[in-house]
Image (cartoon, rainbow, N blue to C red):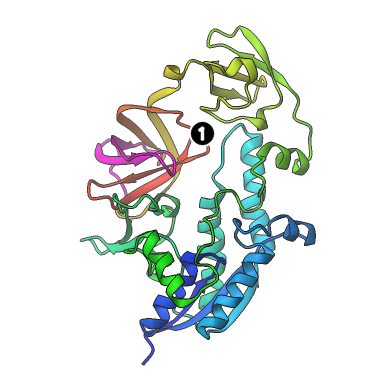
């Protein structure tokens, strides 16, 4: 007897391929689907490299995996949703002097909103992905995601803003498996995705040149402006604020020998440069908060947590308090480097279960 119908989001990579195999072995009625997100045929060509996901080559790789596993396969069109929720958001954030995280937006609004909604409408019970993350239930009954402290591939950070309903309809079958073992399984099955390299870049910017992408897609010119020091003195000229992010040294020319971006001021088109030790801070504020492991915080009452301010950031001890406007103030025990507006801060309890997360102001 089937354990239920599950739609696996096949990206054309090894992780989702093995996830589909495991679910079929576990007795689920498995369907494979790849999301079509490119905006036109030129984009399809641009993002077809092996390291990308959702490009034309990725679709064909996913199709071959589905055929090998003898499961139905579909290509689902989410171009409009992807442009509105991911690409437009990405551009808007840079135009505000902030650094967006499009992969988090894609997870929340494309994979777990558009895809799940489509799946449920087709009578599917679950969606599944190849994420290295584990869904667990808190003593309160709430669902959350458990960080794997020992797995360098842990992806819990990128999934902090899923809802309880979405978690309840999600399976992550490779959550307890390390990457090397996943590749071994794929190799033993003869999957063509077994040796496929991990995606390292944003799928719609395959050459990793954010500045060129933004210049091509924004509707207004972004003029050059001044680099200033912390006292306001002009020390050089930048190429346009969309080319930079907090903590950056690359691309600063001679000014970047011992200097890093500390602050981007859109109002006067300046970028403040500072020594490395001056881009550390122990305080941040987050908004757009999603509570996962707990229902919420009590205004004014401190909560001890572990905080991450970027995907590869080592979890660090911090103290959280929430104000009457729903914004969380976080104070780290020790200063953290390059806290960046627009990025996400994710907070865990001491056992590594996600409490909540939000966008850094």
The residue at 75%/38% (across/down) is: 215
Quick one: 196 or 230, which is closer to the camera?
A: 196
Left or right of 33, for residue 221: right
Q: Is residue 216 visible?
A: yes
Q: Quadrant of residue 159?
A: bottom left
Left or right of 43, for residue 19: left
Q: Quadrant of residue 143?
A: bottom left
Quick one: 319 or 28, which is closer to the camera?
A: 28
Relative image position of residue 308 (x, y in whole percent): 37, 40
Taking the magenta stretch, the answer to whether it contains residue 312 is yes
Query: Above or below — where is 290 with respect to 73?
Result: above
| Mark 1 residue element | loop
Magenta residue span: 296-324
Left or right of 248, for residue 176: left
Tell which residue pokes out farthest to the left in this image.
Answer: 139
The residue at 38%/66% (across/down) is: 174
Q: Quadrant of the N terminus?
A: bottom left
- Residue assigned mark 1: 341
Relative image position of residue 121 (x, y in whole percent): 54, 79
Q: Is residue 127 visible?
A: no
How many numbered marks, from 0 up? Answer: 1
Q: Quadrant of residue 226?
A: top right
Relative image position of residue 138 (x, y in whole percent): 24, 60
The residue at 32%/53% (across/down) is: 147
Relative image position of residue 294 (x, y in whole percent): 29, 53
Circle 1 crowding by C-alpha within 10 Å: few under 14, some 14–19, many from 20: many
Query: Above or below — where is 279 with respect to 315?
Result: above
The residue at 29%/41% (across/down) is: 306
Query: Above or below — where is 8 with respect to 178?
Result: below
Quick one: 12 or 237, which is closer to the camera?
A: 12
Taking the magenta stretch, the answer to whether it contains residue 274 is no
Left or right of 274, for residue 85: right
């Amino acid at each position: 007897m089937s354990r239920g119908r599950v739609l696996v989001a096949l990206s054309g990579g090894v992780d989702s391929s093995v996830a589909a195999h495991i679910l079929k072995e576990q007795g689920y009625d498995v369907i494979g689907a790849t999301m079509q997100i490119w905006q036109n045929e030129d984009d399809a060509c641009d993002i077809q490299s092996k390291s990308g996901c959702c490009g034309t080559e990725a679709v064909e790789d996913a199709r071959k995996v589905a055929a090998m596993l003898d499961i139905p396969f579909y290509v689902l069109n989410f171009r409009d949703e992807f442009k509105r929720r991911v690409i437009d958001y990405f551009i808007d954030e840079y135009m505000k002097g902030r650094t967006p995280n499009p992969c988090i937006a894609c997870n929340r609004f494309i994979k777990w909103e558009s895809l799940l909604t489509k799946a449920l409408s087709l009578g599917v019970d679950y969606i599944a992905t190849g994420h290295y993350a584990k869904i667990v239930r808190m003593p309160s009954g709430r669902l959350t995601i458990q960080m794997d402290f020992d797995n360098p591939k842990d992806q819990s950070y990128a999934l902090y803003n899923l809802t309880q309903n979405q978690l309840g309809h999600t399976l992550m079958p490779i959550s307890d498996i390390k990457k090397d073992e996943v590749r071994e399984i794929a190799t033993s099955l003869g999957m063509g995705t077994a040796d496929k390299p991990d995606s390292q870049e944003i799928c719609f910017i395959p050459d990793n040149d954010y500045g060129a992408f933004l210049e091509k897609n924004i509707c207004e010119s972004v003029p050059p402006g001044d680099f200033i020091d912390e006292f306001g003195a002009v020390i050089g000229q930048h190429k346009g604020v969309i080319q930079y992010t907090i903590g950056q040294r690359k691309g600063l020319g001679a000014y970047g020998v011992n200097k890093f971006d500390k602050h981007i001021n859109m109002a006067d088109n300046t970028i403040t440069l500072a020594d490395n030790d001056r881009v550390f801070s122990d305080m941040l504020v987050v908004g757009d908060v999603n509570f996962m492991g707990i229902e919420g915080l009590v205004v004014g009452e401190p909560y001890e947590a572990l905080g991450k301010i970027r995907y590869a950031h080592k979890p660090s001890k911090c103290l959280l308090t929430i104000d009457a406007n729903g914004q969380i103030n976080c104070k780290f025990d020790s200063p953290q480097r390059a806290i960046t507006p627009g990025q996400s801060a994710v907070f865990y309890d001491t056992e590594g279960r996600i409490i909540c997360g939000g966008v850094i102001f």
